[in-house]
Image (spheres, helix red, strand yellow):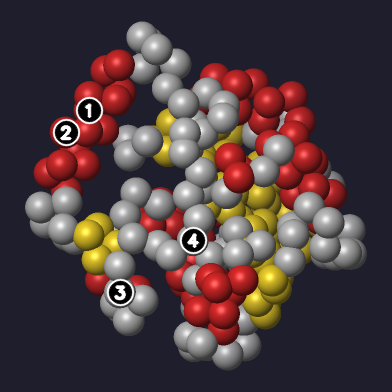
């Protein structure tokens, strides 16, 4: 069953993006200022604000930003703008997070921009999706399908209102190679529900 209601409490929502929100929150724990790139209607931003004093969400999809601004808390800054061109001050965030947004942008430009906006010692953490590398990824795809079909019987899937880009333009291998070339010492991981994660701490 798919639940599309924006009135569904955050605690009752689940999908393959929400599954990994906790990973990102933990990665930037202790930060003072965090930027949520591609924040959508603000679910991750709201969760971050429970732990982070200053949270900014940015998204190019105006209806999603409008929804985000109607939901508490009111002290999250939401920007309807293009992350790649918005005039942020360089090195102005202790943490930067992003969920399933990298494939909406040119990944080289997006990762470079994130690195520029991160303060030395700050952490970038994101999750994304990519195309499988066939046939090597067949076992992973089968395992994800089995796990997903089991999970959806225990918790309805919540469908976000933001635009969807499908299929992703890059493979998992391409994203891993790109990340390691742009962000030395970045940690790349594959996850069960068709997602990968990247975490990187900017050198002091």
The residue sitting at 26% across, 33% down in the picture is 144
Q: With respect to residue 125, does 60 lie above or below?
A: below
Q: Nearer the viewer, mark 2 or mark 3?
A: 3
The answer to whether any part of residue 28 appears in the image is: yes
Residue labelled with disc 2? 146
Tell which of 48 and 9 is nearer to you: 9
**Alpha-carbon span between mark 3 and mark 4:** 13 Å
- Write down the residue under mark 1: 143
Q: Position of residue 40 (x, y in %)?
A: 53, 65
Residue located 64% across and 58% down the image: 37
Rendered image: mark on residue 162: 4
Badge count: 4
Label 4 SS: loop
Q: Earlier in the sequence, mark 3 or mark 4?
A: 3
Q: CA distance from mark 1 to mark 4?
A: 27 Å
Q: Earlier in the sequence, mark 2 or mark 3?
A: 3
Q: Look at the image and tell me in which quarter the N terminus lies.
A: bottom left
Mark toward the viewer: 4 or 2: 4
What is the distance, in whole Å, between disc 1 and disc 2 at their CAs?
5 Å
Mark 1 vs 4: CB contact within 8 A? no
Q: Pointer 1 and pointer 2: residues touching (CB < 8 Å)?
A: yes
Please determine whether, in this image, residue 35 is positioned above or below residue 170: below
């Amino acid at each position: 069953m798919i639940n599309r209601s924006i009135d569904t409490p955050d605690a009752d929502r689940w999908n393959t993006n929400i599954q990994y929100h906790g990973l990102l929150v933990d990665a930037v724990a202790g930060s003072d200022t965090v930027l949520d790139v591609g924040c959508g209607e603000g679910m991750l931003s709201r969760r971050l604000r429970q732990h982070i004093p200053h949270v900014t969400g940015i998204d190019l999809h105006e209806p999603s930003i409008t929804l985000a601004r109607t939901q508490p808390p009111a002290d999250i800054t939401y920007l309807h703008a293009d992350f790649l061109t918005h005039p942020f001050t360089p090195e102005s965030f202790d943490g930067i997070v992003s969920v399933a947004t990298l494939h909406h942008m040119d990944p080289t430009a997006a990762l470079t921009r994130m690195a520029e906006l991160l303060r030395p010692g700050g952490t970038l953490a994101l999750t994304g999706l990519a195309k499988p590398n066939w046939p090597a990824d067949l076992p992973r795809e089968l395992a994800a399908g089995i796990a997903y079909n089991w999970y959806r019987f225990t918790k309805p899937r919540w469908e976000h209102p933001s635009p969807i880009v499908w299929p992703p333009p890059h493979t998992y291998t391409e994203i891993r190679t790109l990340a390691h070339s742009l962000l030395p010492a970045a940690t790349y991981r594959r996850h069960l529900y068709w997602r990968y994660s990247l975490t990187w701490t900017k050198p002091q």
